[in-house]
Image: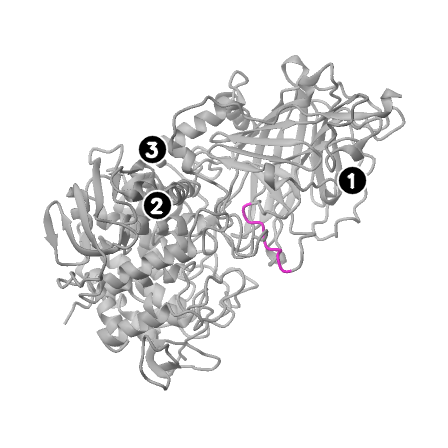
Amino acid sequence: MLSSFFHIVRIACVCLLPITAARLADYVDPLIGTVGPTPGSAIAGGNSFPGASLPWGMAKPGIDTSYIGIPNGTAVDCNAGYTPLGNVTAISMTHVSGTGGTPTYGLISQMPILGDLADINLADNTTYWQNRSLKDETASVGLFQTVLLSGVCVEIAASNHSGIMRYTFPLRSTSANTSDSTPGLVDDLAGPFHDDAHVLVDLTHVLPAYSSQAYSQRFLNGAIRIGTGANAQPSYSGFATYTGGWSQAQSHTLHFCGNFSADGMVPTSDYTTQNAGDRAIGAGTFTWPYNPLQRLGRRSKPVLRSFTDVETYAGSGMGIGALFSWTPDLRNTSAGVIESRVGISYISAEQACQSVAHELPSSFSFEQVVEQAKSEWEEKILSTIEIGEDGSSSSNDTLKRMLYTALYQTGLMPTDKTGENPYWETSNAAPYYDDHYTLWDTYRTLLPLYHLLYTNTYSRVIKGLISIFSNEGFLPAGRIANWNGRVQGGTHADMVLADAFVKDGGELDSSIDWQEAYNAVLNDANNLPEHNEDSVAFDGATKEGRGALDDYLPLHYITRNHTRSISRGVEYSQNDFALYSIAQKLPNTSTTDLTHFKTRASWWQNQWSSQANTSLRLPSYLSNSTTNTTFTGFPAPRNSDGTFNYTAYNPLTCGSCGWGDDIYEAKVWETAFAAAPHDMSRVIELMGGDEKFLQRLDVSFVPGLGSSVGANNDAGSALFNPGNEPSFITPWLYNYVPGHQWKTANQTRATVDAFYSDAPHGYPGNIDGGALPSWLIWTLIGVYPVSPQPIYLLGSPRFSVVKVRLFRGTARETVLEVRAEGLSETRVWPQGVWLDGVALERSWVTQEEVRRGRRLVFRMGAEPRGWDRGERPPSLSGWG
């Protein structure tokens, strides 16, 4: 019989966009940074978000995957939702990009399900999750597309507060010809309901924690209302409240509003028992006993209820969701392609509905949404840097993909939640940004890049940080889900505000309240915050502020009575230098403040032991000695009586490198170089002078001398860790010794070549909210910021010509052209540098020189040359 043969009718899963000339967006690959060094595993990967987003957009719809079922040794937290091996559990509306730690978000989800529901438990995602065909998975600016192994094609696009998902369900027809059958997709779905198309909405869905279960997110309560719109198309709205995640938010509520493009069937009272089966048609809600700690596979199946225009609420201990169903067939293929538009809001479901109506009206096609996103990314982000056509490097597509993907990834976070703050009123005049995850990661390279490239957004970010202090009493060190937390070391919003203030030459918004900014950093410096409890840090105080001030203020250093004592001891002093920098420029600042914070900016030296040492056997190219070489002078733990405590201390390690150790995520060796970027003259002196400093730098890059800082944080085997923020400045430090800038050229180029690429494993670890991509951008251009000083160190450009559009959209807008004359694969060392035709004898430039400059020229050669014999970069202690 013909009816016994089936073949799949697959509606084209292709975004048909207009063919245009090559554009910058074509060089962006959002999948770069989604995989680690182990093929298929995200361990030590970038955790980049490959889904859809606009620059700084609040809606970031993308797939969520599970770590359950992944082979041993390859599972890791799915911080951005995406992993290459994990089964897809949902498409959710909120994500971060590039973060480590405990996952946050993955909220307000949908999941397309094909076929019979008889074996599916809607409260257990292991019964409906799907893996997908990686060869059919693509990501580009504005669009993410994948094909589930059920045959369902998923396409995702986004606007600022809303997203659009297009699901293409495969259809079956009867035919004597089975040659079109696609094994492994839907052949196992034959049966009376094999064509049924479903979209599941599960309000309890979150990105769960793998490594820190105690911090995992949890659903608290929520409500959902199912309705019908025009042409009987189903819609839904409501809210859900969650707790947990990275910042350990007490609770945060997200409202939502969604609709579907295909006509839904009218719900009936016998919703789950039509035709004596488990077929579900129309739309219905369901609840079940919710226990996030209960093992999947043991949850009872919920009962669907066909409520329309009645709000269903689930409180403590109950989960809630909804199911929408269609029965497409070959005579009505419109139901085989279902679009859903979903808005989110922290204010109300009504505001979420308004976002959908305004940003994604039904008259706006999926393709138009994608094209609008590409245009916005080009205008706001990608066009800030133009590669010139002079030299072979301009045709190097690999470097272009690395550069423009990195630029793209700098625009994903922080998140613009202006108009969406539930705690105080925000507007374009009083903007608000969330998801600073975290400033410990981003103050060094990301936000200084914002100052030059995204100046107007940078002003908004600065105003938003100040507003958090004004309304909550403390600046954030990290912040997500509208909640301050967590503090890894110092209070690095101080660094951000100081860097902005000392570099501002009139390009920043004149309405920024710098006096309030100073009040905010003074508060960090002088006032002990409340000590929240934190299971990974016995002394707590990880929400905000400087939790070790009770040691730091009376002792001028931090003891082991506090966790991360070395990290905090040196970072607090860096933060104090930030205060000193603001006080120098701010009118009417007292001389008492100036003197006090200048003194405190040197307290990092109290954390430094002149006796701490380690010995290493050096390779022959660094030493002719057959014995170990000893290096003396490192930061070390101290007791309250002033003695140093060397118990379980080793300058080559950091213990387990976590919250409860002496140092956070950096070996003592690394921390020594990063102890005081504002006072490198004293750092060099404490390391034994120029020659010993240079030798220690050289040793940092020798493979095999390093130790593990944890599988998810390792990058290479040297003491230098290219994926660790305290090490960001290390390869640039040769500039502090005259005549050795050529070694900076060596090591920065070597770091890029060894650890960065245009492959999915294109970063040496988590990209940390844009920190690593911004380091790469600076290095490719050939300059590097030293926050919070108004200077840039000079490196070795990777392009012959780069035009950088500075302060765009402001009255100070200008273009700086960076040229590397004679650049080739062998001519990589600067022979000299000229700024607007004037030869420089120093290996650094000031913010004012960058602001006024028009052309920065590096003349490249095939041999190293010590051209930089002039003035060293500024240092608090001066140069003797």
Amino acid type at mark 1: Asn
In the displayed structure, 12 sits above or below 252; it is above
In the displayed structure, 90 sits above or below 651; it is above
Q: Which residues are magenta?
A: 73-80
Amino acid type at mark 2: Ile
Q: Nearer the viewer, residue 317 or 384?
A: 384
Check disc 2 and report the residue beneath it: 466
Secondary element type, mark 3? loop
Check disc 1 and report the residue beneath it: 121
Residue 678 in the image: x percent, y percent?
Answer: 25, 62
Q: Nearer the viewer, mark 2 or mark 1?
A: 1
The structure residue drawn at horizontal position 38% and vertical position 55%, both measured from the top left corner, is: 753
Residue 34 in the image: x percent, y percent?
Answer: 52, 48
Left/right of residue 248 with respect to residue 400 in the rendered view: right
Q: Nearer the viewer, mark 1 or mark 3?
A: 1
The structure residue drawn at horizontal position 83% and vertical position 23%, both measured from the top left corner, is: 269
Check disc 3 and report the residue beneath it: 429
Q: Nearer the viewer, residue 846 or 384?
A: 384
User: How many numbered badges does the structure rendering display?
Assistant: 3
How far apart are the alpha carbons under marks 1 and 3? 48 Å
Q: Decide which of tag 2 and tag 3 comes sooner along the chain.
A: 3
How far apart are the alpha carbons under marks 2 and 3? 13 Å
Magenta stretch contains residue 140? no
Secondary element type, mark 1? loop
